[in-house]
Image (cartoon, rainbow, N blue to C red):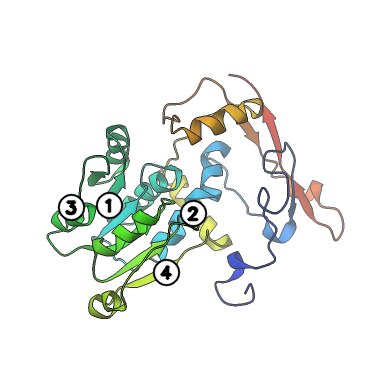
Amino acid sequence: MCLTEGGETRCFEQLNSGRKVDGTFAEYTLVPYRYLTTLPEGPDDEMLAPILCGGVTIYKGLKICGATPGQWIVISGAGGGVGSLGIQFSKAMGYRTIAIDAGKEKGEYCLSLGAEVYIDLTTATDVPLVVREKTGGRGASAALVTAGSGKAYQDAFGMLGPFGRLVCIGIPPPSQLVTFHPLLFIDMGITVIGSAVGARLDIQEAISFVERGLVRPTVQMTTLDKLSAVSEQITQGKVRPEPLPLRLELTISRQLESLWSGSEKMNCIHKSLQRE
């Protein structure tokens, strides 16, 4: 897979921190030299960190969504970490964004980030119908589903206009299957594609939006000893966009030469913690 064009991020043998190996929340980590990404001077490290995961994930999805500037796109799960970055990238790339999520608070948040339309799942009875109404009856050119919900995918089919594209990003539980009839694809000419994070060039491109001030992640700072509490807050949906009083300062060494050792060429990223 990884030798196929565009297949590097889908390598069957990849070892991801926190997924295949331990170390996601460690203070130090080793990174193979060939996968180091040079970060620009200027933006704070905490502004760049979210781009290296959720940011590049949604940016890649937008790159392959098939829409052109000025067309409507839908982001399902727009109030989450990936989706909220997607709203900003979408606006910067010239798309008109319809954000879908649950609750008034997330609606205010999505609109503040640049979404033109917000659809509240707690009040809308027929989300695809609302999308069609907001797009003048045509439907969206692309729908990016970041929510891990089978229903979100099922609804997305009805939101797409002629030759629209569904981009699969969120991962529902195995029990939440999505059904369709082939005539949907035959009559409408729509396509479905999966997007898995992004490659090194995508990372550099996504970072450039932060450098230009077009994308600014909403970051809440905390300390490593609070991770269990933060994880519980996320699970309960209690994490809010307001900054927290605690600060996690990431200090990333850019003096790579001093850390290389012969053929190993590994880099160590040091994370120092301090309170404001």
Q: Is 270 situated left or right of 48 in this image?
A: right
Q: CA distance from mark 4 to mark 3?
A: 24 Å
**Which numbered disc, 1 or 4, marks the residue that appears first in the sequence?**
1
State which quarter of the image contains the C terminus. Answer: top right
Q: Are the two marked residues, 4 and 3, in contact with CB atoms closer than 8 angstroms?
A: no
Q: Is residue 248 visible?
A: no
Closer-to-camera residue (233/70): 233
The circle drawn on residue 130 is 3
Residue 63: which quarter of the image? bottom left
Q: Is residue 272 placed above or below 81 in the rendered structure?
A: above
Between marks 2 and 3 in the image, the one whose residue lies nearer the viewer: 2
Closer-to-camera residue (112/188): 188
**Which numbered disc, 4 or 3, marks the residue that appears first in the sequence?**
3
Q: CA distance from mark 2 to mark 3?
A: 26 Å
Residue type (three-letter) at the residue carrying disc 3: Val
Q: CA distance from mark 4 to mark 2?
A: 18 Å
The residue that mark 2 highlights is 173
Q: Is residue 185 placed above or below 40 in the rendered structure?
A: below
**Which numbered disc, 3 or 1, marks the residue that appears first in the sequence?**
1
| Crowd tier of the residue under label 1, counting other residues whose Cα lies within 10 Å: few below 14, some 14–19, many 20 or above | many
On the image, the x and y values in percent for residue 71 come to: 24, 61
Q: Are the two marked residues, 3 and 1, in contact with CB atoms closer than 8 angstroms?
A: no
